[in-house]
Image (cartoon, grey):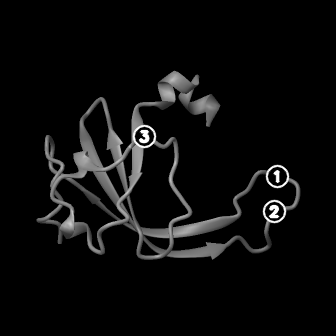
């Protein structure tokens, strides 16, 4: 991703958190209280929820992992992909960290 994002400082536009304590996106009423201190999260099992906080826009995106499938055949001479994920996403309203009204 370095070609797209430049140096590591620029890549810090977004931070991620694993919403491990909730079962449904609608149970997240304040995504700002999650722990965004880790540079990455995972592994995330199907049903798990990852929150992406885009710092410049102050928007929150919830990704629910629906399924993870290994790449077929797995790569042997490259860096991936090793798996593919199907996700359902929810974007909180501008200025909000509340997903309780998500469909």
Up the image or down, 74 lies above or below 30; here it is: below
Q: Nearer the viewer, mark 1 or mark 3?
A: 3
Q: CA distance from mark 2 to mark 1?
A: 6 Å
Label 2 Cα neighbours within 10 Å, binned few <14 / some 14-19 / many ≥20: few
Q: Residue furthest right?
A: 77
User: Dot 1, how many residues are within 10 Å of its Cα: few (below 14), some (14-19), or many (20+)?
Assistant: few
Q: Quadrant of the C terminus?
A: bottom left
Q: Position of residue 66 (x, y in %)?
A: 44, 76
Distance between the Cα atoms at labels 1 and 3? 29 Å
Sequence-wise, the earlier of marks 3 and 2 is: 3
Identify the secondary structure beneath mark 3: loop
Q: Nearer the viewer, residue 42 or 83?
A: 42
Q: Which residue is mark 1?
A: 78
Q: Is residue 66 left or right of residue 72?
A: left
Q: Where residue 37 is drawn, which disc sits there?
A: 3
Q: Position of residue 59 (x, y in %)?
A: 25, 42
Q: CA distance from mark 3 to mark 2?
A: 31 Å
Which residue: 19% across, 68% down?
27
- Quadrant of the drawing holding the N terminus: top right
């Amino acid at each position: 991703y370095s070609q797209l994002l430049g140096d590591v400082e620029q890549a810090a536009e977004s931070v991620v958190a694993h919403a491990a304590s909730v079962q449904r996106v609608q149970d997240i009423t304040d995504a700002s209280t999650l722990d965004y201190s880790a540079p990455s999260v995972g592994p995330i099992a199907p049903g798990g929820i990852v929150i992406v906080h885009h710092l410049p826009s102050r928007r929150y995106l919830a990704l629910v992992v629906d399924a993870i499938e290994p790449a077929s055949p797995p790569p042997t001479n490259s860096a991936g992909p090793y798996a593919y994920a199907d996700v359902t996403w929810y974007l909180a309203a501008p200025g909000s960290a509340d997903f309780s009204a998500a469909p």
